Amino acid sequence: MLLQMTNIHAGYGKIEILRGVSLEVKAGQVVSMIGPNGAGKSTMFKTLFGLLRVTQGQVMFEGRDITNAAPGDLLRAGIAFVPQGRNVFPLMTVDQNLRLGAYIRENGPELEADIARVYDMFPMLADARAKRATDLSGGQQQMLEMGRAMLLTPKLLLLDEPTLGLAPMVFKEIFRMIEALRERGQTILMVEQNASQALDISDYAYVLELGQNKFEGTGTEIQNDARIRHLYLGR
């Protein structure tokens, strides 16, 4: 098991948001977390990545206890996080953003080859490599964030609402990129508002509600469950 989170409690000060959430991610899987607003999905990511403190429970990564490890240590352990919203360096170029994102790596031929692969995967970024990040569209900025995270060669990639605020045609392109990453063997844990599309490409999924596990199963099982379709998928 690559990642195992067991009975996680966490929140903001005295306000507890997560109340015993558990999940597992196997290497090579795409796993989604869905649920209504306020369910605790983004809080789960912040807790996993060391931005919020676990008050009860345990986080294991590759068999090692990483509960409450610092974000920098988690990066070096192989976990990369693309948070909700656009988090680029606006006055830097696309190329500068990518190189700064790979700050924990040494400069050299291997890094240059990986940057070239990012440009191959995201042709829009290749065409805009000399542009400032602030001049990119929302979709291009999301691609830049994903490409920057991939330069860390993560064992686990965390994507928090990767299509938030994007036009339908653009989020289709983002999902195509996520599928391409899966085909390359990238392990992904994803929170996504477009639940149906996320489930289409997910090996496994968890439904959170009010900070607790409500349902879990394969992407197909979740989509075919009449209760889930009615409550969470609007069908």
Image (cartoon, grey):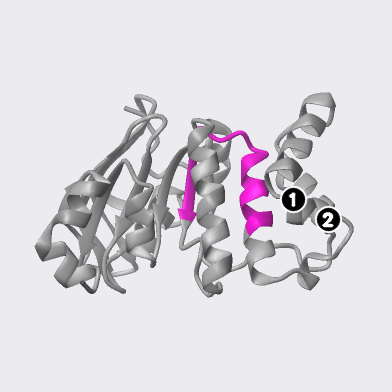
Residue farthest along the left direction in this orientation? 227
The residue at the point 84 percent across, 61 percent down is: 92
- From this viewpoint, is residue 56 visible? no
User: In the figure, is residue 118 to the left or right of 157?
Assistant: right
Q: Nearer the viewer, residue 200 or 185?
A: 200
In front: 121, or 27? 121
Query: Which corner quadrant holds the C terminus?
Result: bottom left
User: Do the residues under discs 1 and 2 have CB atoms within 8 angstroms?
Assistant: yes
Residue 147 x/y as whole percent: 66, 47
Determine whether, in the image, residue 181 is placed left or right of residue 93. left
- How far apart are the alpha carbons under marks 1 and 2? 6 Å
> Disc 2 marks which amino acid?
Asp
Which image quarter is the N terminus in? top left
Q: Position of residue 187 (x, y in %)?
A: 45, 36
Tell me the residue at 25%/68% (across/down). Answer: 233
Q: At 61% across and 51% down in the image, what residue appears? A: 146
Q: Residues within 10 Å of mark 2 (few under 14, many from 20)?
A: few
Q: What residue does disc 1 label?
A: 123
What range of the chain is rendered magenta?
A: 143-159
**How many numbered marks, from 0 up?**
2
| Residue 163 lies in the magenta-colored region | no
Residue 169: assigned label: none
Say which of 149 and 28 sits in front.
28
Q: Horizontal placement of 7 versus 54: left or right?
A: left
Image coordinates of residue 22 in percent, x first then y, are 22, 46
Q: Secondary structure at mark 1?
A: helix
The quadrant where residue 90 appears? bottom right
Residue lying farthest right? Answer: 130
Residue identifier under label 2: 127
- In this view, the residue in front, 44 or 111, is 111
